[in-house]
């Protein structure tokens, strides 16, 4: 059939695009590295070759962890967006737009400004997760999605309110922050991969992969939920338990992203919508394809952030907002068209 063939080609195309984007990211930068040197350094990570010491250091200490983090964060945000859209029955749902990212970021800012260090290196991601989880539950309870789909205007108004409150509290904490804390707070507000090292990559990789795997297992219940809560219950879905799983997992993925790279918006809106347009609403393929597409998009956005104004670096959140803002407005206008006619 045509759609399965298209889906298979899309998997192959995105996998090749991810490899190509990874190759471009590893070779491009202030220090340009030939592809053969990159491949040699990748093949011998512990080699001590004085002739290629610079290439080895740039690749293994800077570019490779950064590129892998972009793939992981992009995948996490895109899958969180796809799952959130399924939960709310609303294609406008996105961790940034509805306020989950702002809530998680507020938790991280509180940890920084109040100098909380209860769990050591885990304090920041745990604080971001708890704040994001509470925010996600609050949004869900306020939105009260109907069995036949979510209310666009209600969800958007809730998102505006959540973002406004979180922004006000973040602004107040920024006002209280010391001079040395302001740089970190700027990092959280705009999003960046500039501080990535291997430790954050190794920390977020299992969290992201676990979240992706567990959400992938909810593909069939999500498809049934799209038919309406009543129909899902008749089909044997424990809707209350499914909500808890989805909110927990989307909060986990969003908070993990915010905890290590700050607020990066619109990945979770743009990518799932494009994938849904190409392969349909079935979550069995929508979730993994969104992961691939999100990783590629953020990898390319990071490449642009490093390359547009060298040696300076543009915050990556600015680039994703530049892409996602107009797309969001177009999506709202497109959905309002049939309602107005």
Image (tube, grey):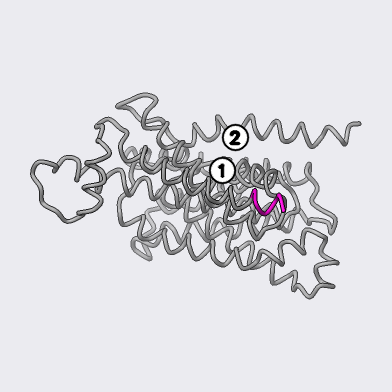
Q: Is residue 334 left or right of residue 202?
A: right
**Camera-side residue of 296 and 230:** 296
Report the residue at 40% width, 50% height from top.
69
Quarter of the figure with the C terminus: top right
Q: Which residues are magenta?
A: 1-6
Residue designated by label 1:
267
Asked if the stretch drawn in magenta spans residue 291, the answer is no
Q: Is residue 65 above or below residue 283?
A: above
The extreme left residue here reads 50
Magenta segment main secondary structure: helix
**Disc number placed over residue 91 in the picture, else none:** none
Residue 12: x and y, percent?
53, 50
Residue 131 occupies quadrant: bottom right
Residue designated by label 2:
324
Report the residue at 41% width, 51% height from top.
260
Q: Is residue 287 left or right of residue 28?
A: right
Q: CA distance from mark 2 to mark 1?
A: 7 Å
C-beta proximity under 8 Å, tags 2 and 1: yes
Residue 187 occupies quadrant: top left
**Camera-side residue of 85 and 117:** 85
Chain-order first, disc 2 or disc 1:
1
């Amino acid at each position: 059939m045509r759609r399965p063939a298209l889906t298979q080609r899309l998997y192959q195309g995105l996998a090749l695009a991810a490899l190509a984007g990874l190759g471009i990211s590893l070779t491009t930068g202030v220090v340009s590295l030939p592809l053969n040197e990159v491949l040699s350094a990748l093949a011998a990570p512990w080699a001590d070759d004085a002739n290629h010491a610079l290439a080895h250091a740039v690749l293994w200490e800077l570019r490779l962890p950064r590129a892998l983090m972009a793939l992981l964060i992009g995948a996490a945000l895109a899958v969180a967006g796809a799952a959130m859209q399924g939960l709310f029955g609303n294609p406008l749902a996105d961790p940034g737009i509805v306020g989950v990212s702002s809530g998680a970021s507020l938790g991280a800012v509180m940890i920084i400004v109040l100098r909380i260090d209860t769990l050591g290196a885990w304090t920041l991601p745990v604080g971001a997760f708890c704040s994001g989880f509470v925010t996600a539950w609050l949004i869900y309870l306020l939105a009260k999605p109907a069995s036949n789909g979510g209310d666009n205007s209600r969800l958007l108004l809730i998102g505006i309110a959540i973002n406004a409150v979180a922004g006000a509290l973040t602004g107040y904490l920024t006002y209280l922050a010391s001079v040395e804390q302001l740089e970190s707070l700027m990092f959280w507000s705009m999003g960046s991969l500039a501080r990535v090292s291997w430790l954050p990559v190794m920390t977020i990789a299992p969290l992201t992969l676990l979240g992706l795997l567990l959400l992938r297992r909810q593909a069939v219940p999500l498809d049934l939920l799209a038919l309406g809560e009543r129909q899902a219950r008749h089909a044997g879905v424990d809707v209350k338990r499914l909500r808890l799983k989805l909110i927990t997992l989307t909060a986990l993925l969003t908070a993990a992203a915010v905890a290590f790279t700050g607020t990066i918006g619109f990945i979770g809106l743009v990518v799932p919508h494009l994938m849904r347009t190409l392969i349909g609403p079935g979550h069995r393929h929508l979730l993994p394809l969104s992961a691939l597409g999100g990783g590629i998009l953020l990898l390319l956005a990071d490449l642009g952030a490093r390359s547009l104004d060298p040696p300076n670096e543009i915050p990556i959140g600015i680039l994703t907002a530049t892409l996602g803002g107009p797309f969001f407005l177009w999506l709202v206008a497109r959905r309002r068209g049939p309602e107005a006619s």
